[in-house]
Amino acid sequence: MSGHAASHLNRLDARDRQAADAWERFARGEAVRGGVRADILLSWHRSRDDYRVNPSRESAPVAADGPQSTDGVVVAAELGAAAIEIAADVEAIGGVVSVADGTGRVLSAWGERRAVARARDQNLGPWFGWSESATGTTGIGLALESRGPVGVVGAEHWCSVFQDWSCNAVAVRDPATNESVGVIAISAWRRTLPETTLAPLVQAVHRVERRLHERLPQAQRPVAPRRAASAPARIAATHAGRMIVVLAHEIQLAEFVEGVVWLQTERGRVRAIARNLLELEQKLDGAPFVRISRQVLVNADCVREVTRSRSRGVWIGLDGGDVLLPVSRRRVPELRQALNVS
């Protein structure tokens, strides 16, 4: 074990220690089947086996120079503007917000002065490469490989020198090709990023993708600018202090309680990155969800029972649950339509 890795391990809580132990075993070439998320383990495999990134690398390498398309200039400008808008908030938490192009080449970075200086010591700054092929598993690199918002915390980074950092990142996808063309990320040193840092990144990326969609000739515009029509909706959420991505079919119901959108999923109850149910419905566009009240949205595919009472109205039961949920009277026709029942 390297001196840096050993000192980092001593600072971890029990949950992060599992990831650190898994990293130590994996870096030694041992088989790892638990203790770390599947997307991180896959990224470690790419970093070690495909890209042969040295886990002892101490900083990011200089990025390869290459031509930048007109759309690439638009992405860089839009993400740069979005980063500047949230830079003050990021600075307040002692973090760094960075923007990279579709190759993982960082274009700009802003934030708290000491954090920016520390980041630049490891080359988190303009014209250095943070793709998986350059620096292994990082927020920027994983976002370019992923189809949703990502978080990389501590020992989940492939290079041990980066394991003092936590990062949330979201990639911009070209609406015509669905390829990653840029990334915006927030990083913090030796601290956990607040859950609220992810939503502004997702919103910024949605704005840029809309701009790219508007630039396409009408005949080339796909029906859904965010994802292919056959791809399932993905919802960013938080669980046990970590950012996760939940597929639409995994969600049984969503509930808005005291300003928070909660999702009941196959993995348990998690907190959605959404301000309200309307915003969640927009993200779930095309998925079989129906409102049964102002506060509750349910997956129609999970409804297994519909109970009618003269005095109490209509109630529904979901797969695997023993609790009946009341349906607002004015929502009953919408429910019938969603279930295709008379």
Image (tube, grey):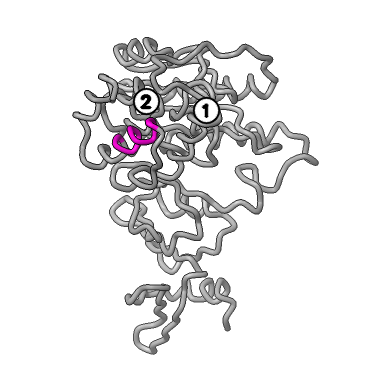
**Hey, which quadrant is residue 71 in on the image?**
top right
State the mark number for residue 217.
none
**Left or right: 181 in relation to 220:** left
304 up-or-down from 297: above or below: below
| Quadrant of residue 178 within the rendered picture | top right
Could you give the CA–CA distance between mark 1 and mark 2, rounded to whole angstroms? 13 Å
Query: Which label was assigned to residue 187?
Result: 2
Q: Which residues are magenta?
A: 20-28
Was residue 107 drawn as part of the magenta stretch in this picture? no
Tell me the amino acid under the disc marked 1: Val
Residue type, label 2? Ser
Residue identifier under label 1: 183
Magenta span dominant secondary structure? helix
* x and y, in percent, of residue 73 in the image: 63, 19
Question: Horizontal and vertical percent for residue 133?
Answer: 54, 24
Neighbours of disc 1 within 10 Å: few (<14), some (14-19), many (20+): many
Q: Report the residue at 39% width, 43% height from top.
A: 32
Residue 215 visible: yes
Q: Residue at x 54, y 41 (%)?
A: 147
Figure check: 4 above or below 12: above
The residue at 51%/27% (across/down) is 132
* Figure quadrant of the C terminus: bottom right
Front residue of 227/276: it is 227
Q: Which is nearer the eye, 105 or 76?
A: 105
Disc 1 is placed on an element classified as strand
Relative to 267, residue 302 above or below: below
